[in-house]
């Protein structure tokens, strides 16, 4: 019989609060004046909540926010024109286009329109290319947050076997590149991976980003593994759960992030960090 492991929870809420406080101090002490433009198209309630919490976090740090709330009927050309205007506006340091956009709008084309130096989400092909090449650039926020959470455990990533479940451009692929850059041996799994449980069983570090409630079972987790749960899934009863069966992971994982209160707050904190970084690079300050 396998020995039970003491499972510790990684408090993403606290780590994110610490990062935001460091940013607040940096902005105040160096008298930085970063400005973030947010764009919300339509009335999706979840997107509105996300933009509100990003705006609140920004203002607490001392980042000025210019909110653009546009109707769901906004055309591709109108959005393109707004992005171009914000790209050219020297007072704007970061541009956040809240996704998903209403049906009919080409998200990828619009994300590509954002100037790479103002792309605080880190989704632009130039920034993803810089990540691939291991060069400085604005990093995608959720993957960067996952790495912070792993670092917080005090475990070196080098030489570990990391298994990433999910291969999206915003989470799975970039987090795999970040783990690789820190010398993990990385396996990326997706919906066509035939033996997912066995892949996960081999992992010292699991990053779950599939968007499937409680998919990763307790007995898939190698005793002593670090488990980072990116998934945010709303159940019929309104509760939020991750991709990992959190209760079943107790006694197996050495470290695990909760949902909510794990990766989510880190994503917002990294958006703030990118905005301050973007300002410093554009103004050669800070
Ligand atoms: P996507 O839907 O873009 O990607 C999901 C990935 O998971 C795909 O690569 C898909 O494979 C894979 N997948 C789906 N089902 C399975 C399965 N049964 N077995 C193995 N792989 C599977 O999602 P995102 O990357 O955008 O988001 C993933 C999750 O993370 C969601 O729950 C989302 O809400 C959450 N999220 C949380 C954030 C945070 O701040 N905490 C930020 C961003 C996302 P395939 O490519 O083959 O289809």
Image: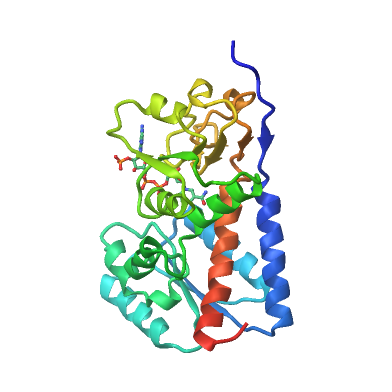
> Against 190, is 63 above or below?
below
Residue at 52% from the left image edge and 27% from the top image edge? 221
Question: Which is nearer the eye, 188 or 270?
Answer: 188
Q: Position of residue 142 (x, y in %)?
A: 50, 54
Tell me the quarter of the image containing the N terminus: top right
Q: Position of residue 7 (x, y in %)?
A: 67, 30
Residue at 41% from the left image edge and 49% from the top image edge? 176
**Image side of residue 28 versus residue 283, left or right:** right
Residue at 57% from the left image edge and 37% from the top image edge? 226
Residue at 35% from the left image edge and 54% from the top image edge? 169
Tell me the quarter of the image containing the C terminus: bottom right
Q: Is residue 202 visible in this depiction of the protein?
A: yes
> Against 218, is 99 above or below?
below
**Image side of residue 227 versus residue 136, left or right:** right
Question: Which is nearer the eye, 34 or 153?
Answer: 153
Question: Which picture quadrant has residue 185?
Answer: top left
Question: Which is nearer the eye, 235 or 202?
Answer: 202
Q: Position of residue 127 (x, y in %)?
A: 39, 68
Residue situated furthest front in the rendering: 159
Task: Point out the quarter of the image occupied by ligand 1.
Answer: top left
Question: Which is nearer the eye, 33 or 255?
Answer: 255
Residue situated furthest top in the rendering: 1
Q: Position of residue 57 (x, y in %)?
A: 64, 65
């Amino acid at each position: 019989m396998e020995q039970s492991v003491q499972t510790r929870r990684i408090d993403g809420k606290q780590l994110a609060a610490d990062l935001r406080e460091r940013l607040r101090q940096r902005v105040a002490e160096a008298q930085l004046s970063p400005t973030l433009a947010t764009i919300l198209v339509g009335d999706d309630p979840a997107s509105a909540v996300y933009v509100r919490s990003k705006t609140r976090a920004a203002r607490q740090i001392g980042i000025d926010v210019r909110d653009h709330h546009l109707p769901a009927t906004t055309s591709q050309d109108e959005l393109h024109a707004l992005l171009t205007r914000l790209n050219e506006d020297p007072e704007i340091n970061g541009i956040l286009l809240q996704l998903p956009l209403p049906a009919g709008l080409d998200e990828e084309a619009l994300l590509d329109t954002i100037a790479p130096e103002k792309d605080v989400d880190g989704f632009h092909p130039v920034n993803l290319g810089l990540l691939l090449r291991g060069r400085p650039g604005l990093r995608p926020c959720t993957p960067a947050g996952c790495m912070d959470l792993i670092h917080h455990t005090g475990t070196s990533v080098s030489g570990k076997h990391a298994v990433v479940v999910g291969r999206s451009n915003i989470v799975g692929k970039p987090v795999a590149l970040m783990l690789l850059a820190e010398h993990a041996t990385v396996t990326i799994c997706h919906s066509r991976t035939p033996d997912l449980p066995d892949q996960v069983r081999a992992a010292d570090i699991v990053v779950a980003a599939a968007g499937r409630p409680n998919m990763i079972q307790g007995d898939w987790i190698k005793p002593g593994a670090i488990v980072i749960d990116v998934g945010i899934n709303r159940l019929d009863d309104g509760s939020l759960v991750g991709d990992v069966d959190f209760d079943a992971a107790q006694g197996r994982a050495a470290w695990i992030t909760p949902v909510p209160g794990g990766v989510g707050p880190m994503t917002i904190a990294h958006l703030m960090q990118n905005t301050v970084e973007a300002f410093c690079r554009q103004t050669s300050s800070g």
